[in-house]
Image (tube, rainbow, N blue to C red):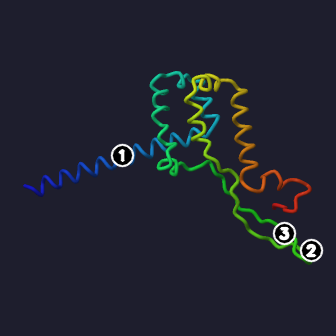
Amino acid sequence: MESNATAAASSTNAEARAANKYRFELELEFVQSLANPHYLQALAQQGVMEDPSFVLYLDYLQYWSEPEYAKFVMYAALYFTSVVRFPDISGSTNGVTTNRMLFSYPHALHHLQLLQNPKFRADLKAEEVLQLLVEKQFDHWRTWCGQPFLSYYSPHSKLHVK
């Protein structure tokens, strides 16, 4: 009889853990999607940003900014592999395969913070605001990842990507 109660409690515990894991993954995926300015604008244009329950949900999601949760947010990142030609002392070039991270910054958490402001949520409908977000995001990615991305295409660059 006692083993039946233990098995039932264990089953209930396993179900609760599975439900918590599902909720964690679902909320994490949604928070990560906030890094996409086009997605934010689509939500605003559909009127989702005006829904009081959605505004409360955005407020609830602020716990993702805490360090114990923020570490799980996968920052928008794009990796690429390229062959970079470095001239050696003799003037010949040797191909070196490198893995570079192009984009990396927690825009999702920054946008979550901005979404707490009703004016920002309303302004997201405008194309100018979308363009500003995209430009700021790109400018940050371009300059933040060490060697600026555009420098690879500069005619004065010492690196030549093939």
Position of the C terminus, as image quadrant, is: bottom right
Q: Work out whether mark 3 precedes mark 2 in sequence or the reverse, and give the earlier one.
A: 3
Instruction: Specify whether 148 is left or right of 154.
Output: left
Residue under label 3, please give it. Answer: 86
Q: Work out whether mark 1 precedes mark 3 in sequence or the reverse, and give the earlier one.
A: 1
Q: Residues within 10 Å of mark 3 (few under 14, many from 20)?
A: some
Query: Which circle marks residue 91 in the picture?
Result: 2
Query: What residue is shown at x 55% (from left), y 29% (from top)?
Result: 116
CA separation in Å, label 2 and label 1: 59 Å
Query: Which circle marks residue 4 in the picture?
Result: none
Q: Secondary structure at mark 2?
A: loop
Which is nearer the eye, 51 or 118? 118
Which is nearer the eye, 148 or 91? 148
Instruction: Specify whether 12 is left or right of 28.
Output: left
- Dot 1 amino acid type: Asn
Q: Is residue 89 above or below residue 37?
A: below
| Residue 29 position in % (x across, y down) | 50, 43
